[in-house]
């Protein structure tokens, strides 16, 4: 089965990526596997990652679903998210870090927009 990413790129569905996303919100491994199994009947070739996200979110218990939605909520802030990035930068500065906000960093294949880069003792 293939999924369509937000960028329009198509890639093979990787169950490990879905499991990792579920685990990141504090779900125990066995429960994460059960959640993925419960949504598998609704998956189809050409499904968008957005639809996959909604299916998984609806299968999560309420507190975990809220944590799963946090990244999306921050993205929905759009330009208003800049204030949040600046706030996080100020917090890290108070903790003794050097802070760079809204940076473009060159990756192995593409450049990535990074909201906040923190540096301490020369390490990013």
Image: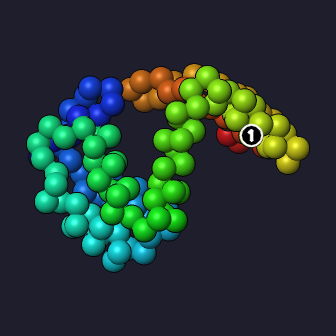
Q: Is residue 46 left or right of residue 54?
A: left
List the residue tagged with mark 1: 88
Q: Position of residue 60 (x, y in %)?
A: 39, 64
Q: Position of residue 100 (x, y in %)?
A: 73, 29
Q: Position of residue 52 (x, y in %)?
A: 28, 48
**Above or below, 27 relative to 19:** below
Color style of the picture: rainbow
Q: Look at the image and tell me whether residue 62 can be seen.
A: yes
Q: For residue 15, which quarter of the picture?
A: bottom left
Q: In the image shown, does 120 or 34 lie closer to the viewer?
A: 34
What residue lies at 15% left-to-right and 41% top-to-bottom? 2
Rate crowding at label 1 as few (under 14), some (14 to 19) or many (20 or more) other CA atoms within 10 Å.
some
What residue lies at 35% left-to-right and 75% top-to-bottom? 31
Q: Is residue 53 left or right of residue 44?
A: right
Q: In the image shown, does 66 or 113 lie closer to the viewer?
A: 66
What residue lies at 33% left-to-right and 77% top-to-bottom? 30
Q: For residue 114, which quarter of the picture?
A: top right
């Amino acid at each position: 089965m293939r999924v369509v990413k937000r960028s329009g790129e198509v890639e093979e569905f990787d169950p490990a990526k879905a499991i990792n996303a579920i685990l990141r919100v504090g779900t125990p491994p066995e429960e994460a596997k059960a959640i993925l199994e419960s949504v598998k009947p609704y998956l189809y070739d050409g499904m968008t990652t957005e639809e996959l996200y909604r299916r998984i979110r609806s299968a999560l218990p309420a507190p975990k679903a809220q944590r799963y939605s946090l990244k999306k909520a921050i993205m929905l802030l759009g330009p208003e998210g800049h204030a949040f990035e600046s706030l996080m930068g100020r917090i890290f500065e108070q903790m003794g870090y050097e802070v760079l906000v809204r940076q473009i960093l060159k990756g192995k294949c593409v450049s990535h927009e990074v909201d906040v880069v923190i540096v301490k003792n020369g390490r990013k």
